[in-house]
Amino acid sequence: MFEVSGLLPLETADGSARQPGPAVPGLHLIADWLDPDACARLLSKVDAADWSAPLRRRVQHYGHAYDYGRRAVSAGASAAAAPPLPRWAREHARRLVREGLMDQEADQVIVNEYRPGQGISAHVDCVPCFGPVVAAVSLGSSCTMDFSHPGDGTKAAVRLAPGSLCVMTGPARWTWRHGIAARRSDPGPLGRIPRDRRVSVTFRTVVTAA
């Protein structure tokens, strides 16, 4: 079983730095996991597919559909709502395994679009639904993701730049909540940083489907 622990910087198989998020055990950030050209190509492929809007933001589901009301992934006939992983998703899923970031290929991918002013409430990805590693790549605009510990109230703000990969394992996956404040700009060292359109692509493995 693949496991990442501790707060020390690690390296991926290709030698790129994997940095833990501040004060969040099990959170690792890889800057420039996708270069600008790769980001543009991936965003183009994402936008060529159909979007749905079960929430205020637009989403795409592949492999398994996630039912927001039941907080469960769907299988069987209901899974027809989620098309198979497209080629680009399978290629990135294989890369995550090849670089030692996931222990098996993701079989569920969710794409979320965030317009300026949109966010997502603090949450933990469905514990009984998904496996021990959640990996998400950011496209388009950067944003700040807020992590919070439900027990002691510790908080950490993590800047997600375009092309970066955020990998949640251990406590960052199972215990800490993560969310994005619904605002049009984020605080920065030199003042407010405006947001533009951001798209996140999240890779997960399904444990149970109902």
Image (spheres, rainbow, N blue to C red):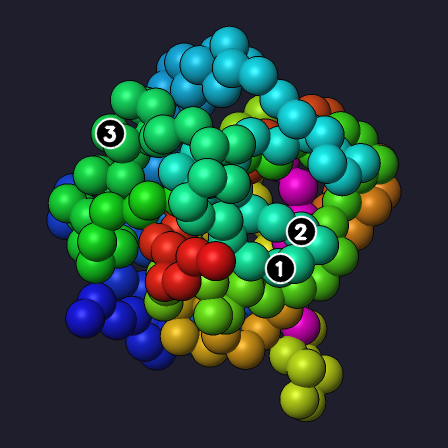
Instruction: From this view, report whether residue 137 is shown above or below residue 154.
Output: above
Instruction: From this view, report whether residue 182 is shown above or below residue 198.
Output: below
Indicate the position of residue 194 as horizontal and vertical percent values: 78, 32
Rendered residue at 67%/72% (across/down)? 148
Amino acid of disc 3 = Glu
- Residue 148 in view, yes or no: yes
Residue 143 in the magenta stretch? The answer is yes
- Residue 170's disc is none
Give the labeled residue for mark 3.
91
Residue 147 lies in what quarter of the image? Answer: bottom right
Give the labeled residue for mark 2.
68
Which sits in the foreground, 85 or 157? Answer: 85
Indicate the position of residue 153 as horizontal and vertical percent values: 72, 83
**Apparent side of residue 55 relative to residue 21 in the rendered image (left or right):** right
Pointer 2 local density, CA inside 10 Å: few below 14, some 14–19, many at least 20: few
Rendered residue at 62%/59% (across/down)? 71
Q: Earlier in the sequence, mark 3 or mark 2?
A: 2
Closest to the camera, between mark 3 and mark 2, is: 2
Rendered residue at 73%/50% (across/down)? 120
